[in-house]
Amino acid sequence: MKALTEFTPENKSKIEEAIAKAETYTSGEIRVHIEDKCKEDVLDRAAFIFDNLQMEQTKERNGVLFYLAFVDHQLAILGDGGINAKVPENFWEEIKDDLVSNFKKKQYTEGLIHGIEKAGHQLAKYFPHHGDDDVDELDNEVTFGDV
Ligand code: CA
Ligand code: CA
């Protein structure tokens, strides 16, 4: 898989650390899935992955998936229904634009880290962290491949 030339174990860990950090200020649960190619509509594909990772299993329905098809240059940020019900329609646009401009500079890992941080801060306004009661509802692991 070509994406693994960029997303080395070290970079994968850095992204997972960014997710863990973002989830200290929001109860929203962030995941990242990366593959090389996206053979269908990118939003359909992201929805399939979201399902496959069982990301709807959060109490507040506030899971967010960053989906990237590395070779095909396709990107989607997909939030669950609990988020869509609360946030403005263009909620992900700025983060997406930032990601695209970072990816154009080939800053894939840095771009994702930045986007995750920003998503955490934005989500915190609507879904603040629950302090000691907060649970890590979805694994922070970055997943790869054609599932
Ligand atoms: Ca949590
Ligand atoms: Ca998590």
Image (cartoon, rainbow, N blue to C red):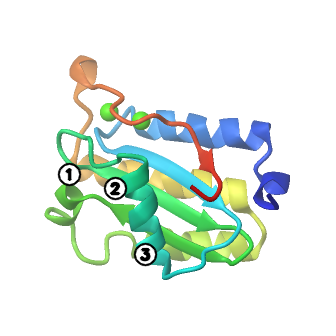
CA–CA distance between discs 3 and 2?
21 Å
Tell which quarter ligand 1 is in.
Answer: top left
138 displayed left or right of 104: left
Quadrant containing the C terminus in the rendered view: bottom right
Which amino acid does the dot numbered 1 rest on?
Answer: Tyr
Coordinates of residue 99 in the picture (x, y in percent):
59, 69
Q: Which mark is residue 43?
A: 3
- The quadrant in which the N terminus is found is bottom right
Task: State if disc 2 and disc 1 touch (CB < 8 Å).
Answer: yes
Tell which circle, 3 or 1, labels the residue nearer the N-terminal end. 3
Q: Which residue is mark 1?
A: 126
- Residue pictured at 29% horizontal, 46% vertical: 124
Spot the residue most to the top. Answer: 132
Is disc 2 surrounded by few (<14), some (14 to 19) or many (20+) residues within 10 Å? some
Q: Residues within 10 Å of mark 1 (few under 14, many from 20)?
A: some
Reading the chain from its start, which is encountered first: label 3 or label 2?
3
Q: Marks 3 and 1: which is nearer the front?
A: 3
Front position in the image: 104 or 41: 41
Q: Which residue is mark 2?
A: 122
Q: Of circles 3 and 2, which is in front?
A: 3
Looking at the image, which residue is at 27% across and 58% down?
A: 80
SS class, disc 3: helix
Horizontal and vertical percent for residue 128? Answer: 23, 40
Q: Is mark 3 within 8 Å of ligand 2?
A: no
- Residues packed near mark 3 inside 10 Å, few (<14), some (14 to 19) or many (20 plus): some
